[in-house]
Amino acid sequence: MKATEITFKELKEKYSENEAFVILGCGGSIEEWINGITELLYEEGAVTHNDPDKVWEGAYTTSTTGGRIDLILMFPDKAADAIDVGRLAILRLQMHEDYPNSWLSDYYSNYSTHHK
């Protein structure tokens, strides 16, 4: 799965009604991040596949004014088919120290000052 670059403004305009898993500060290969996070979530039972194309609706990156690259993994319309959202919520909290992250809905509020 390839990630598409998007501005914070475009993200908010196009996907304000959607939910996603956001990983903050992804350096290096974005495809490796997508594959690695998906594999980790698969091993922990939060997603049903280790193939990102079967889990996520899409992947996006957005840059902050400070140069941080954030990865947005969009939930599909029927997230229950591929994602155990309850398990993901628990893992999200456990992962936060090693992989700072957010829900997209929280990202809009908590990180808007990091963007133009």
Image (cartoon, rainbow, N blue to C red):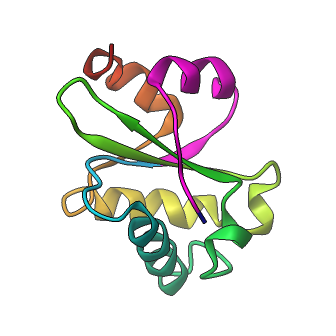
Q: State yes or no: residue 40 in magenta.
A: no
* Residue 14 x/y as whole percent: 67, 24
Percent x, y for residue 79? 74, 57
Residue drawn at the location 44% of the way across and 30% of the way down: 106
Q: Along the horizontal axis of the image, is 48 left or right of 26? A: right
Residue at position x 65%, y 52% in the image: 58
Q: Residue at x 40, y 61 (%)?
A: 30
Q: Is residue 82 above or below residue 116?
A: below
User: Residue extending furthest bottom?
Assistant: 43
The residue nearer to you, when weighing 104 against 30, is 30
Say whether residue 9 is magenta. Answer: yes
Q: Quadrant of the C terminus?
A: top left
Percent position (x, y) of residue 20? Answer: 57, 45
**23 left or right, relative to 82:** left
Camera-nearest residue between 116 and 22? 116
* Residue nearest the observer in this picture, 67 or 50: 67
Of residues 81 and 86, the one drawn nearer to the viewer in this rendering: 81
**Position of 21 compared to 48: left or right?**
left
Up-down relation of residue 4 to residue 35 (above or below):
above
Residue numbers of the magenta segment? 2-21
